Image: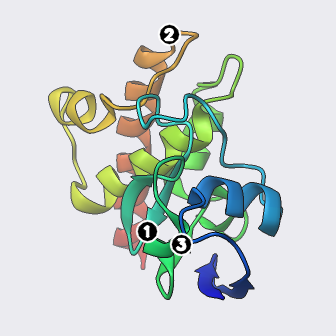
């Protein structure tokens, strides 16, 4: 039995310890915001947070997450109001939208670690997330906006 904390909710999963975390999240727990893209950790569509770090859930064995804290796009914020989520909407980032839960999860880690990222910081942090529609300029613009929203939020707290 594997014990998981996903989005602050406890789960006891009877699964093969080698099963990718992605399939546990989607098929067993039923949270479908995290997407399957490539299955080899190259596209970033499956990005989730494991103890606060962005990981590719398609290649992360569920045994690695045993007893750990997992956050999916559904748990990033209570009301879809994380600064990255707000900025993504304001900047109309998604085209097809498939990659964006992974993009937002990667951006959230960047913003936690760097409150004022440069274009180079953003490009470096987001390099592992592929957008087949090519919305990279909008992604960068949204991350700058999210950083600004986050700074304003922190200043008013």
Residue 95 to residue 18: above or below:
above
Q: Residue at x 18, y 34 (%)?
A: 118
The total number of labels drawn is: 3
Judge the density around disc 1: few (<14), some (14-19), many (≥20) Cα neighbours within 10 Å. Answer: many
Measured as percent of width and height from the top left, residue 117 is found at 21, 42
Q: Which residue is mark 3?
A: 70
Position of residue 127 in the picture relative to residue 133 (left or right) = left
Q: Which residue is mark 2?
A: 134
Disc 2 and disc 1 in contact, CB within 8 angstroms:
no
Q: Secondary structure at mark 3?
A: strand
Q: Residue at x 64, y 69 (%)?
A: 16
> Is residue 100 visible in this depiction of the protein?
yes
- Location of residue 31 by image quarter: bottom right
Which of discs 2 and 1 lies nearer the camera? The answer is 1
Q: Residue at x 53, y 72 (%)?
A: 70
* Quadrant including the C terminus: bottom left
C-alpha gap between disc 2 and disc 1: 27 Å
Disc 3 and disc 1 in contact, CB within 8 angstroms:
yes
Disc marking residue 132: none
Residue 127 to residue 20: above or below:
above
Q: Secondary structure at mark 2?
A: loop
């Amino acid at each position: 039995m594997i014990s998981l904390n996903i989005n602050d909710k406890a789960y006891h999963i009877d699964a093969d310890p080698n099963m990718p975390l992605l399939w546990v999240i989607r098929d067993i727990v039923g949270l479908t915001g995290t997407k399957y893209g490539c299955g080899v950790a190259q596209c970033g569509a499956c990005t989730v947070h494991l103890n606060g770090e962005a990981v590719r859930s398609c290649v992360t064995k569920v045994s690695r997450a045993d007893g750990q804290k997992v956050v999916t796009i559904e748990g990033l914020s209570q009301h879809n109001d994380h600064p990255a989520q707000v900025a993504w909407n304001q900047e109309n980032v998604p085209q097809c939208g498939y990659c964006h839960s992974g993009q937002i999860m990667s951006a959230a880690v960047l913003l936690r670690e760097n409150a004022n990222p440069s274009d180079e910081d953003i490009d470096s942090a987001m390099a592992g997330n592929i957008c087949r529609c090519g919305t990279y300029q909008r992604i960068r613009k949204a991350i700058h906006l999210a950083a600004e929203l986050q700074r304003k939020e922190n200043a008013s707290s």
